[in-house]
Image (spheres, coloured by chain):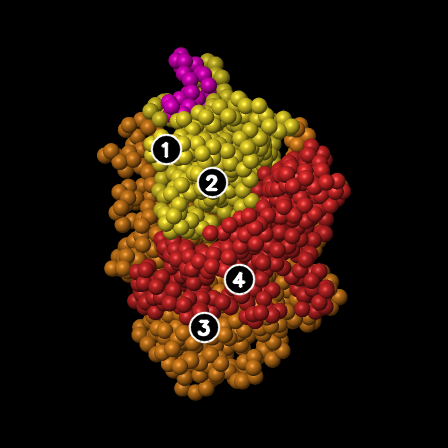
Amino acid sequence: MNRRRCLFGLCLFGLTLLASCGGSGEKAPPAPPPAAVSKAPGEAAFLPAYEKRAPVNGGTFTRPIPVEPVTLNPVVASDQVSFLVYKWIFDPLIDMDEKMEPTGVLARSWEVSPDGRNLTFHLREDVSWHDGKPFTAEDVLFTYRACMDPTVDAVNKRPTFAEVQSVQAPDPHTVVVTWKVPYAPGLAAWNLHILPRHLYDYPPGKGAAFNQNPLNARPVGTGPFRFVEWRRGEAVVLEANPAYFRGRPHLDRLVFRILPQAETQLAAYRTGTLDMTTLSSEQWEEVRKDRAFLEGSSVFEYPARQFFYIGWNLDGSVPFLGDRKVRKALALALNRKGVVDRILGGHGTLLSGPFYPGGWEYNPAVAPLPYDPAEAARLLDEAGWKDTDGDGLRDRGGKPCAFECLVPAEAEMFSRWLEVFQQDLRKVGVDMRVRKLEWGVFLDRTHRHRFEACLSGWSLGDDPDPFQLLHSSQGKLLPSGVGAGQNDGAYSNPEVDRLIEEQQRTFDREARRRALWRIHEIVAEDQPHAYLFASTQMAAVRNRFQNVKASRAGYGLFTWYPSLLEWWVPRELQ
Amino acid sequence: MAAYALRRLLLMGPTFLLITAVVFAAVKLAPGNPFSAARTAGEGAVRQMNPADYQDLLHRYGLDRPWYVQYGRWLATLASGSLGISYSQRRPVSQVLFGEAFPGGGFLSSPLGATLLLNLLATLLMLAVALPIGFSAALKPGGAADRLASGFLYALYSLPNFWVAVLLILVVGVHFRILPFIGMRSEAFASLGFWERAVDVLRHAALPALCLAYGGMAYVARFTRRALLESLGSDFVRAARARGLPEGRVLWGHAARNALLPMITLLGLLLPGLVSGSVIVESLFAWPGMGQLFMKAVYSRDYPVILAESVLGAVVVLGSTLLADLLYGAADPRVRLE
Amino acid sequence: MAPTLSLLRRVLSFPKRRTRPSGLRFPAVFLGLLAAVSLLAPLLANNKPLAVDLDGHLRFPAFRDLLPFRLFLRPDGAALALERDPRWFGPSGEGRRRARWLLLPPLPYSPYETSLERIHEPPGRDHPLGCDDVGRDVAARLVHGTKVTLLTGVLSMALALLVGVSLGALGGFAGGAVDRLLVSPAIEVMLCFPTFFFILTVTAVTDPRYLNLWSVILVIGLTSWAPLARFARAEFLRLKSAPYVEAARALGAGPFRQALRHILPNASGPLVVNAAFGAAGAVLSEAALSFLGVGIQPPEPSWGNVMSLVVRHWNDWWLGLFPGAALFLTVMAYNRLGEALEGRLGAGAPGPEEAGRRR
């Protein structure tokens, strides 16, 4: 019995070998791999034949999304995926362009009053909704009021307008925003997508009607694409809006396919079901040798507006974390560059503060901490943490130098980094225990400041204001037990507080830059977080799409204006 | 028998309450609520929601009341015939589960329809392969089919389903490109005729159904084999043979019929599996079914959806157990249902 | 005590009822091998030497990791040095230079040591089964992960048996209101209970990393007892009116004695068989839990979590093949065990729930 069955079983496994051979490229004669294949940010991808030609209309673009959108109502939706879909159906007043400068979409122009408290938008007059009715300032007012209505589930839109005193529409094509005090980050808040009042209006005080409006599943906006259908669990389909004020987008259709498993993305791209795929560094290593893959795709590499950090809890519950020297030592002991080089394949940038490397707000004089375990050991000795009981761990006064780091379980890559960091810290005599928590639980613990250290990512917004992350008011615990803001480690430095408030009050770019650079310096000294790195992302798009470009400011392929609206497919390739 | 059925139905009530209460308590034990992730979600470093607003939000949805109060309110909603409103999708849960037009063409595109379809196909596949094998294994103990049943099928059972899924995707989907492996329908579905649509769905369902079916084949085959063997060894079969009946009639007229009884039990146990979607298989193949919905609902703490799915599961399990018992009683007059 | 002895006697000594060979040999040998490997794991795969003459002293560092010693022995100098540098006894390590001679285990790697240089290394001379995505040796992880597989199979079924048989016996034996109002509803609740919540809740509440193996066992055990309870109940119901039980009752035996001494030994056949098949299912469940990320957490090794890596890194075929082969053989062994017991102890249908169980 055994022999035959075991043999059979082993044959079954042999299929994996076959499969793995089949997965990567053909057995072509060895040729040198194409050099410098990926496009840098700002570089547009063209097939040589079409670079000088004029764009034509037509073509369908299919892209994957990891989960289903929650709702296609911009005021109610709070998740990234819904945004990726509804941003093509609706327009905001202003949006960020490829270089992170605000550019007018529904607003033709705008100006700030000399005292810095009034912002006036002059709206375009040639815009109409998908159902034909004209767009006016009334719609802007309506959308704003819906955000501020307590019975509407505008869960995270409301705080962006916290400093607003009033919003008025003196005439159908002008909107005036008045702030209580001059507030520079307030401009960026108006990338709010506008809803039509005549379709979404609801009885005053009955926000539930707005939240559950059936139009949330078949929205009507002013955007470049119109809604076609939403096959739940499968895909959302949009088609070009021929009456768009900028002229119709060249592409005919956008299809968002729902694909929960990231690994199947690449496989689906290869078999033609998808027109784009993101590439992890390992996948990139695999496909760069695949000639057929490269000949059909444009590959892009761009830094994302996101960085990863280990947040320390500074509220006193972990004694040694309260010492700045210790925090610096811990950061020095982590081999961040090693992780970037080996695990991320070099696709990452070390950073020294919570700002976008390469942005105007980032202080280039503040260098990221090097990997220096010897210096780390020295600093720990100096801080009084030595191994007195011979168990390999430092301690002081009977307490071991040990802590627990929380990490969301769904982010597998975090766990891999932590495994390396765990060993790094062990080498200097510090014990880090890793605790994986389900996402909802992780958020709950960090919001309640019930953690010692946590590994997390931070998405940088359109405005570099670090208020949420660094201001002491955002680190206080409320009576209900949750934190007032996102300063989960309760970092508090009066000088930083003052500088943050200062840069919020002025619209002068130079003054803001000086304040932000000083904040950067102080934070690099204080180390409230161990800043790990900013990731670069890679994506492949079928090269039949022309004029595809990644933003220079980290907005990737889609999140800037106009991005996809300028893509086109030559007639022969449609 | 009618009295028995009625009594069972009445007893189902408290059982059902107990099931839903336990599920609800377990769900509430996990920290977090539908809006905790939304507090800091969104594009960019969005400012945290004002705590007063957040409390107000919780209050509006009744999430700040003690768990038994929330449970009571949910029961009241259920009693009035509604499954509630989904927190994350903000539309009625009945629409979430059953689709917008129910019954009708829309049902196929609902999570329940998608899962039922996939599981039905998987069960049919499993039975189609395993029943004949089990049957012939019983007829020829020690023969080829018997060895197949205990060897090959057990080997299949020992492979974890995510592993087999990846293998199938790589070999069948990517390398040979025979079958699609993403989703339930292709983009061109709307423009296809009726039969072409059916073929499209079947092609998409082939790989996931195979992943779901292979594991149970071993048991079904052995179960059938044992049932038939016992039946073949029983007295009435020997009597039939002694009477000189041809083997065919002995087999089909007598032995197989008796083997049906345990098969009813088997079916009764397979039924509940039909509505529960496999989380792993559905997410690997992007099949828009109940498993995916369930995972999403748990992660976003969408209590009405979670509870509705448990209700559905409970109803199906209780119903199918009752059905199996009743059928058994009807099929075998010797069984007295007291 | 007595029921166990009688069970053992029946298993080991009796004449075979079937025409097919009993097949108890393969499972016994294989599972015994697994038990040996899991107990001796620190001697098979370790970056500490089995014996070394360090600075003139003879030491046996690897032996200090064996289970009974590990609990009360403090780490010695060699162990401390290895914490700082896992390759201390490696070809270029300081330890090797200072040692006059040393004897390394067959796999001179710890299952925990990561290495950025060895990421995704395919099987080769240095690492016979390759390395995983953070550079840990796969063979070492499989060796140390054996205990997870064994314990998951055995202990979760033991727990399920304990709970299931107690409840089922209670219901079947006592009958009446206790059965109708307590036991049967409990069994039916359990059958519909969505296991994922339970897992989620347990993950949220458990603390130190060591609890993870036990939380997996607890979860699987506490969600698998319902079919066993159903069987136990049916058997007890059937056997409580058996003549020998009535005889015992007439002689004055109380309910416990009747249940334990008389009914249980005769009911145990189908239960043990089911438990054997259930152990196979438990092992597969652990792999599924690891895939979903809620099983044994790295850096603790388990076959399931090595195998689940292949889903994320399709080209690393060795991550899927070797643990898969090991899992395959283990599940086969448990199934063979179940079949062999079935042959010796009499009929007991295998759980058709497995046919419908959705992971």
Nearer the observer: mark 1 or 4; the answer is 1
How many residues crowd around disc 4 within 10 Å: few (fewer than 14), some, or many (20 or more)? many
Q: What is the CA distance from the residue labelled 4 to the residue labelled 2?
A: 52 Å
Q: Work out whether disc 3 and disc 2 sit on a shared chain.
A: no
Name the residue carrying label 1.
C250
Disc 3 marks a residue whose amino acid type is Gln
Q: Chain of mark 1?
A: C
Q: What is the CA distance from the residue labelled 3 to the residue labelled 2?
A: 56 Å
- Judged from the image, the secondary structure of the residue bearing numbered disc 1 is helix
Q: In the current view of this chain or complex, which residue is farthest to the front? A: B243
- Quadrant of the rendered image containing residue A426: top left
Q: What is the CA distance from the residue labelled 4 to the residue labelled 3?
A: 17 Å
Q: Does residue B48 show up magenta in the picture?
A: no
Q: What is the CA distance from the residue labelled 3 to the residue labelled 1?
A: 70 Å
Q: Work out whether disc 2 and disc 1 sit on a shared chain.
A: yes
Chain A's colour?
A: orange
Nearer the observer: mark 3 or 1; the answer is 1
Name the residue carrying label 2.
C238
Q: Are marks 3 and 1 in contact (CB under 8 Å)?
A: no
Picture mark count: 4
- Quadrant of the rendered image containing residue A154: bottom left
Chain assigned red: B
Which residue is at the front of the view, C172 or A429? C172
Q: Residue at x 48, y 25 (%)?
A: C8
Q: Residue at x 34, y 55 (%)?
A: A447
Answer left or right for A223 relative to C166: right
**Residue C5 seen in render:** yes
How many residues crowd around disc 2 within 10 Å: few (fewer than 14), some, or many (20 or more)? some
